[in-house]
Amino acid sequence: MKNNQFKLILIVVVALVSVWSIWPTYRDHELSTRLSSFRSSEDSLKFAIDHRTEIEQARDKSLKLGLDLRGGMHLVMEVDLFDLIEQKAWNKDARFQQIMASVRSSATNSGANPVELLATEFKKQNIPLSRYFYDIRNSDQEIIDKLNKEAQDSLVRAKEIIRNRIDQYGVAEPLIQTQGARRIIIELSGVTDETRVRKLLKGTAKLEFKLVREPEALLRAIESVNSMQAQAPSAPADSAKAPVTASRPSGRKLSEVIGVMKNGLVFTPEYARDYVASVLNREDVRARLPQDTELLLAAKPELTEKGEKYYPIYLVKKTPELTGGVITEAKATFGSQNVQPEVSMSMNDEGTSKWARITGANIGKQIAIVLDGAVYSAPVVQSRIPNGNSVINGISGLDEAKDLEIILKAGALPAPVRILEERTVGPSLGSDYIRAGLLSMIWGFAAVAIFMIIYYNKAGLVADSALVLNILVVISVLAGFKASLSLPGIAGIVLTMGMAVDANVLIYERIREELAEGKSLKSAVEAGYNRAFSSILDSHVTTLAAAFLLSQFGVGPIQGFAVTLMIGTGASLFTAIVVTRVIFDLLIGSGFMNEKSFG
């Protein structure tokens, strides 16, 4: 009797905790329905303000929906390990560049490990890897092992940095997994601004502080490039006579698509920006520039007096004076003078010391703040800066400033990443999936419940009661641990219903056999549970093991299905062995059930 009391208390506690866990989901749905019911936006806004805290708390604790139900983005991203390999090389001569170009081409076609391809190409050309990597005393195999370790570490680091960026952006329950040696799978439910997220994920956040060369040096560099182009074969006659327009900047000489202002600022019009960028990135153009210099474009356009957009061009030292690794804090804010968005940054002790020395030695000169190869601003140093503070301006909006803050806080990616695949699920399609999923659950439950009542009479009602608690426990665990419910997860719940009923069928058939042998109802129930226990335990343990393996090695939908199945299997074992047994003992003791109650 005492054992039954304990079990009854346990069942009541489980039921109450489940209801408590699901309550915020119900409140979130109710408040959302009331918000959408207002006809005027003023009434809706007033209700949202009055119930702001309650709405936020309910939304935070409610059951999260997966990408397929709520809508959002699915991306497959690839880490550019070739860029990482080039960063590790200390000698980058023309031969090395040629080998890298060949290896890149091979990897594009085969998708093989870049390090292995690189080692194969070096071996084919009979060149030791130590000529370009690490120490000359290292063997080829030691260098290969080091590069492979760097590649593995960069993938893990890229995954964590992307996770940090997404967490700061505010996406609930993102799915981020690595696949193979280079790829990262990302699923973001509820995302509506795809362009902003795409930009946030792809930005490498390579921040550098570079000295700007004098205007005279910039003009000489431009002239050198122009003279090189003048010596090259000219464009076709019809192309040469064509006017320089937004649709035809390509094929023109650089001198035709850049200009010089009275203050010596070199610029290019907005329509020619991409063409000029492609010219400046060419190896033959880079070779014509003064040693340790490069030409960079501004990240954002400026406006002329006539309202036309143009991009300034800067000649900067290629070797940075300082990098973004010293940044400890970044904050999106507004400038005190022009009230424009900007990002203020603080540095660690090492960065503060270097920044003070750099600014003190370059008073009156420009220092370009370069992020991912584009100049955001190039302020003139007015005085020595001893406190390690700096500012990125030239930002078009507060959202962009916040994204820069997120990127700088999360850290720089070890290598560039690119999007290989992108799919977007719209909210309307998600709503259709929710409706279809709920209908499948309702029809599945109804079919099982009716069958159990018809076939097992009153005992079927007991099984149906346990089935309701089973579903309640599954959903409450998902909500309580802030896991997301996906379409495969709903499939897992439907499968759980079948497993729960299967356990009850095993027990009920054993009880029928005991009753047929002439035993009393109480003895038959006890014997039936004892005889069925081993079969039920075996089936549930094997299902749990299979679901665990699926959760560990599965990706995306498979993992969602496995997690829900594991929770449901555990709940099914509890309801079949404990819940129904306690209910039977209570009903038999009250005289509500007899031998005919099992059909």
Image: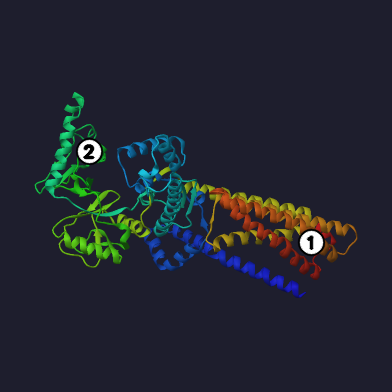
Judge left or right: residue 2 versus residue 73: right
User: Mark 2 is on which residue type?
Assistant: Val
The residue that label 1 is drawn on is 529
Q: Residues within 10 Å of mark 2 (few under 14, many from 20)?
A: some
Residue 531 location, quadrant: bottom right
- Earlier sequence position, callout 2 versus callout 1: 2
Kind of element beneath mark 1:
helix
Task: Tell us which disc is closer to us: 2 or 1.
Answer: 2
Residue 468, given in percent of the width and then of the height, sits at 66, 60
User: Mark 1 is on which residue type?
Assistant: Tyr
| Along the line of sight, the residue nearer the viewer: 119 or 390 | 119
Question: Is residue 599 something that shows in the picture?
Answer: no
How many labels were placed on the picture? 2
Q: Is residue 302 above or below residue 55?
A: above
Residue 587, given in percent of the width and then of the height, sits at 77, 67
Image point (41%, 51%), residue name: 192
| Along the line of sight, the residue nearer the viewer: 30 or 79 | 79
Mark number, residue 285: 2
Q: Residues within 10 Å of mark 1 (few under 14, many from 20)?
A: many
Judge left or right: residue 83 versus residue 507: left
Q: Is residue 231 above or below residue 380?
A: above
Image point (16%, 59%), residue name: 362
Judge left or right: residue 364 versus residue 320: left
Q: Is residue 284 above or below residue 332?
A: above
Residue 105, given in percent of the width and then of the height, sits at 39, 35
Residue 594, given in percent of the width and then of the height, sits at 83, 63
Residue found farthest to the bottom: 2
| Along the line of sight, the residue nearer the viewer: 520 or 555 | 555
